[in-house]
Amino acid sequence: MVSRAIPHGSDVLLVAGSGLVSSGEADHVVATVEAMPGVASVHRAGSPIQSTELLSGRTFATVLVDLALPGVASRPVLDVLRHAADSTGLVLLAGAPGGPGAPGRDVDRMVVELCADDVVLREELGSRHLVRAVAAASRRARTSREHALLRDRSAALAAGSTDGLVVLSDGGSVETVNDVAARYLGVVGRRLRGLRLSRAPWTFVDREDREVPARDCDALLALAGSELAGNGHLGVRSATGVVTRVFLSATPVEGSQGVVLSLRVSQTELALADAVRFQAGLLSGIRQAVVVTDPAADVVFWNPAAEQLYGWSAEEAIGRPVMEVTPSVDPAQQARNIAEAVGQGRAWGGDDVLRRRDGSEFQALVSVAPVYDDRRSLVALIGVSADITARKRAEQEARELSAIVESTADAVLTHDLDGVVRTWNEGARRLFGWSAEEAVGQHLGQLFAASLEPDELRFGIALVTRGEVVRDHQQVGVRHDGSEVDIALTASPILDERGDVAAASVIARDVSERRRLQQQLHHQATHDALTGLPNRVLLQDRLEHTLATSARTETPVAVLFIDLDEFKQVNDVHGHLVGDELLVEVARRLTAVTRPADTVSRFGGDEFVVVCGDTDVTAAEQIAARIEDACRPVVHAGGQPLQLRTSIGVAVTPPLEPDGALLMRCADAALYQAKAAGRARCRVYGSEPAGGR
């Protein structure tokens, strides 16, 4: 059953005068319509001109028109009624068949031209048909107005949209095209209205520009749901042949078979996606772990280095809270540090101890930087972390080594391959007198110009550069103040990670005391403890050295064997202390009358040996005479005046062979000859006694 109600508060216009509707019938029509639910009032126009004035000033729910009214079929009136029919219900009142205004071809033409909703005959004015006709016309007009309003709003929205919008009707015809879509499609929008989709001048193409069939609404809906439409690689080839890559979406119109198409250009998004992929590729190639989070601190990017460092795959890490997959041993403090820095708009960086997925801990260098958009809104956080456990261990070892180097008494320094000092410890300052500030950057040649010859320095650097170690090189160093110090140097190459020599380390030790002790021990081993003269060991060495020199220079060598006569009686009568004083005095007198190049040695007991180079028999006899003269004066020892006498045996080469043992034996034999002859005299081996001597 059709409802006879019309929209509440509606006005109705009755156009009737001297036509087929009499005055009484018009009153009845007014009363019948006013009685309808929702009707506010019924207005009357007695002529077509009056009706056009009313219609131009307000909107009526329904207009009732008496077709028999004079002038109603004129062009101005028809235009006004036709325009009103777009938003107003129109009911025509016609006469009985055969009478004025009766239905016929003119009435049919009027119905078509005016798009009238219904025709009511004169005899039906008092029937329910009039009520039904008015109600139906009013509802149709209201629906038409609502559709027009919705269409106007949709057109306004489409005009203001940055996306291309195309509205298709139930039958697949174009209803609305905004300017954006018209540009993509290459056709003026108004020319597309009413055009069926199957005859559209544009086509959809895939990534290789091959046509994708979409000539009806169902095909469009299927295409819009495809990956091609969603990833931005779908193309629209316009009527001019230009291809535009778009994102396509299609939405069915509720209550109909129509479809709304949305076209959004994807070139920018595709370029952005390419840029994002490029940047992601760069971040993936970084050896440090790179983690990107959204402002809520959930992971959105996780590079391969992060997978290796933390033990989570990218698929597992993305979407999780960053504190879950990169936990700190003190997460609260870490969160406070990062929040404070980001709150101030700056990056945070520092060392931290983090845990891997398996629970193992490692020392990490971490930096977190905020990323803002054009409005300074936080959009992401980029964190970069690296395992620095090995570096920390190396730093600790370096600190320990540095402490050892600084605490050692030895001088420790390093220099590059050019000989420029890099490091200089406290021991080096104490040993050489230069501070680290004075030494670092200086060339070794400048610091040790007084200690090392240039060639010697270059040779040492060359050895180390070849990877050789110079061990315990002994030399006399010169301090900053010019004083000398005995030092022992050890130089070693420093290798880089490739095993190449990159620098050298030098350890210098003050060996002055060791040298003194060595010299003391050597002196004790080669000198007589009582007199300080060379002993037999050193005597043998000096004799061999003198003979070697003699062989080169072809000069004679003389050996004088000296014995103190009756020395035993001195010990027996005066004691050994007096005897020792006497021996010391004899040693002094022998040294005084011999040449500096001669060797005066205590052979043992009261026996002395003198070795003289470049000395023939005559010169040897002269030396023996000086010795006798030197020993003749009284010696005061232990408060006792003692008279000395000496017996001397001499051996000379030539005529003897230049043999040390032979010379010693011959000189000893000559000494015994002198003693046998009565002591206090000199004998030369192989020669006859001369004078009183």
Image: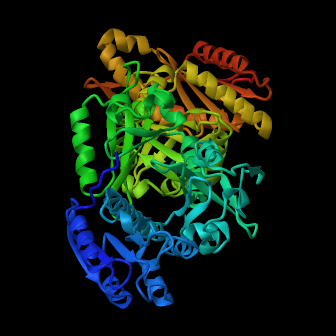
Above or below: residue 183 compared with residue 476: below
Coordinates of residue 564 in the picture (x, y in percent):
48, 20
Residue 519 in the image: above or below residue 500: above
In terms of depth relative to the viewer, which is nearer, 544 or 241?
241
Query: The N terminus lies in which quarter of the figure?
Result: top left
Which residue is at a point 65% across and 42% down the rendered structure image? 465
**Residue drawn at 44 percent across, 37 percent down:** 386
Q: Nearer the viewer, residue 433 or 339?
A: 339
* Location of residue 225 by image quarter: top right
Question: How far from the left and from the top, in percent, is residue 269?
Answer: 55, 56
**x and y percentages locating residue 556 in the rendered image:** 75, 34
Instruction: Please state the horizontal and vertical placement of residue 606, each as a whole percent of the image.
Output: 47, 17
From the viewer's perspective, tell me whether residue 191 is left or right of residue 351.
right
Q: Is residue 223 left or right of residue 102?
A: right
Answer with the quarter of the image where residue 156 lies: bottom left
Q: Residue at x 46, y 38 (%)?
A: 508
Q: Nearer the viewer, residue 648 or 67?
A: 67
Q: How is the image coloured?
A: rainbow
Q: Quadrant of the C terminus?
A: top right
Tell me where residue 398 sits by quadrant: top left
Query: Observer-nearest residue: 436 or 68?
Result: 68
